[in-house]
């Protein structure tokens, strides 16, 4: 095997101390600083910024109107137009959740109930928002369209227990979703 000897090019005195690169970086930084002070920052108009750069002043200004249609926020449970639970406790969302943030305890529906044909409903449905990675797999796998990712990015709590959303909280923040749900279909 042949040995190839590579020689490094000789650096000039200015290249050895990096003075040119440092000055060039300083000039670019100062240009951006003066542009932001004059309100001419690139992107400042699109983000509804304060005029001092492209930094949005949160919480006074929010991303709500700038969120893309495909944005995935926090998951929530929804009811149908008549206030009935859409979830049938199939537990597919629990099984597919990569960080195991969803915990479901199924329960039977009494036989005297009008919707006894559904067989199950969740007794407990908890989502740990600290563990949730907002991947959207729970929404994709749900056959009854019971779980949706809403466009909410400001999920806060003072303790860990505040970040575990139970069934009541998930229905409260989820609201009503209109459309066909297989659970209430008479053919089932």
Image: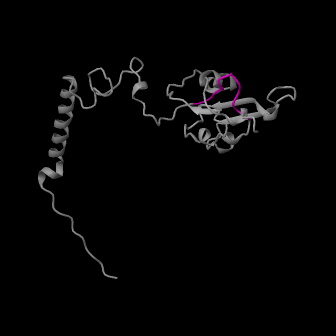
Q: Residue furthest front?
A: 187
- Quadrant (top left/top right/bottom left/bottom right) for the N terminus: bottom left
Lateral position of residue 8 relative to residue 2, left or right: left
Span shown in magenta: 75-88
The one of 18 and 161 positioned closer to us in this rendering: 161
- Magenta-colored stretch includes residue 101: no
The one of 102 and 9 positioned closer to us in this rendering: 102
Measured along the vertical axis of the image, is residue 39 above or below residue 88? above
Lateral position of residue 3 relative to residue 184, left or right: left
Lateral position of residue 86 relative to residue 14, left or right: right
Measured along the vertical axis of the image, is residue 118 above or below residue 61? below
The one of 14 and 24 positioned closer to us in this rendering: 24
Q: Residue at x 21, y 68 (%)?
A: 7
Tell me the quarter of the picture where residue 162 sits. Answer: top right
The one of 163 and 8 positioned closer to us in this rendering: 163
Q: Residue furthest right?
A: 111
- Magenta-colored stretch includes residue 79: yes
Q: Residue at x 42, y 19 (%)?
A: 59
Tell me the quarter of the picture where residue 102 sits. Answer: top right
Residue 28 coordinates in the image, percent (x, y): 18, 37
Measured along the vertical axis of the image, is residue 106 above or below residue 4? above
Q: Residue furthest bottom?
A: 1
Would residue 161 be seen by someone viewing this image from the given angle? no
Measured along the vertical axis of the image, is residue 69 above or below residue 6? above
> How many numbered discs?
0
- Main secondary structure found in the magenta portion: loop
Tell me the quarter of the picture where residue 134 sits. Answer: top right
- Quadrant (top left/top right/bottom left/bottom right) for the C terminus: top right
Residue 160 coordinates in the image, percent (x, y): 62, 26
Would residue 7 be seen by someone viewing this image from the given angle? yes
Q: Residue at x 72, y 35 (%)?
A: 185
């Amino acid at each position: 095997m042949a040995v190839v000897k590579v020689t490094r090019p000789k650096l000039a005195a200015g290249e050895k101390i990096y003075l040119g690169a440092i000055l060039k970086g300083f000039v670019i930084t100062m240009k951006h600083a003066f542009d932001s002070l004059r309100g001419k920052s690139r992107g400042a108009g699109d983000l509804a910024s304060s005029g001092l750069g492209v930094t949005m002043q949160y919480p006074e200004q929010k991303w709500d109107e700038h969120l893309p249609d495909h944005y995935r926020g926090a998951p929530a449970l929804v009811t149908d137009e008549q206030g009935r639970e859409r979830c049938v406790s199939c537990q597919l969302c629990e099984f597919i959740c990569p960080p195991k943030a969803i915990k479901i305890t199924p329960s039977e529906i009494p036989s005297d109930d009008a919707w006894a044909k559904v067989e199950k409903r969740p007794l407990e449905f908890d989502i740990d928002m600290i563990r949730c990675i907002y991947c959207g797999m729970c929404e994709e796998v749900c056959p009854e369209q019971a779980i949706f990712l809403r466009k909410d990015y400001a999920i806060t709590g003072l303790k860990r227990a505040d970040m575990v959303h139970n069934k009541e909280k998930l229905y409260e923040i989820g609201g009503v979703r209109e459309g066909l749900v297989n659970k209430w279909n008479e053919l089932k």
